[in-house]
Image: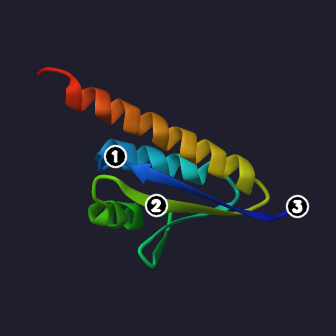
Amino acid sequence: MKSVETKTITLTNQLSMNSLISFVKQAKSFDSHVSLYRNGYSINGKKLSSVITFNLTVKENDSILIITDGVDASHASEHLIEWLKKEMDLLAEQTLSPM
């Protein structure tokens, strides 16, 4: 059965290029369409160039909405939110660690 799921996450940092590439790979692993939405703009979460451009507009502590639409929408949204939370934790650890 096809469904639509929406989840919100607050990004505490901009994602690195490696993280963006990994996010797109994660999004592409699902059959559902994945969109990222913020401030009236929506982009295809499976298109790297769109995700890179979108990331450039995100500032620290901005909230984004992840919208998944398809047969595995619930699993996709849960997975992508959890993955982003882990990335935010890793970025926070790297910021705090001495060089």
Q: Which residue is label 1 attached to?
A: 12
Horizontal and vertical percent for residue 50? 40, 67
The mark found on residue 64 in the picture is: 2
Left or right: residue 7 versus residue 40 is: right
Q: Which residue is label 3 attached to?
A: 1
Q: Residues within 10 Å of mark 2 (few under 14, many from 20)?
A: some
Q: Amino acid at mark 2?
A: Ile
Left or right: residue 65 versus residue 20 is: right
Residue 8 in view: yes
Q: Gap between marks 3 and 2, in whole Å?
A: 26 Å
In primary-sequence order, the first of circles 1 and 2 is 1
Q: Secondary structure at mark 1?
A: loop
- Residue drawn at x 71%, y 47% is 75
Q: Residue furthest top?
A: 98
- Residue drawn at x 75%, y 53% is 72
Horizontal and vertical percent for residue 61? 34, 53
- Residue drawn at x 11%, y 22% is 99
Left or right: residue 13 versus residue 50 is: left
The answer to which of 64 and 51 lies nearer the viewer is 64
Q: Quadrant of the N terminus?
A: bottom right
Residue 46 in view: no
Q: Gap between marks 1 and 2, in whole Å?
A: 11 Å
Q: Secondary structure at mark 3?
A: loop
Horizontal and vertical percent for residue 79? 62, 42
Question: Does 11 sit above or below residue 45?
Answer: above
Quarter residue 96 falls in = top left
Q: Amino acid at mark 1?
A: Thr
Q: Residues within 10 Å of mark 1 (few under 14, many from 20)?
A: some
Left or right: residue 50 versus residue 80 is: left
Q: Gap between marks 3 and 1, in whole Å?
A: 34 Å
- Residue drawn at x 58%, y 53% is 28
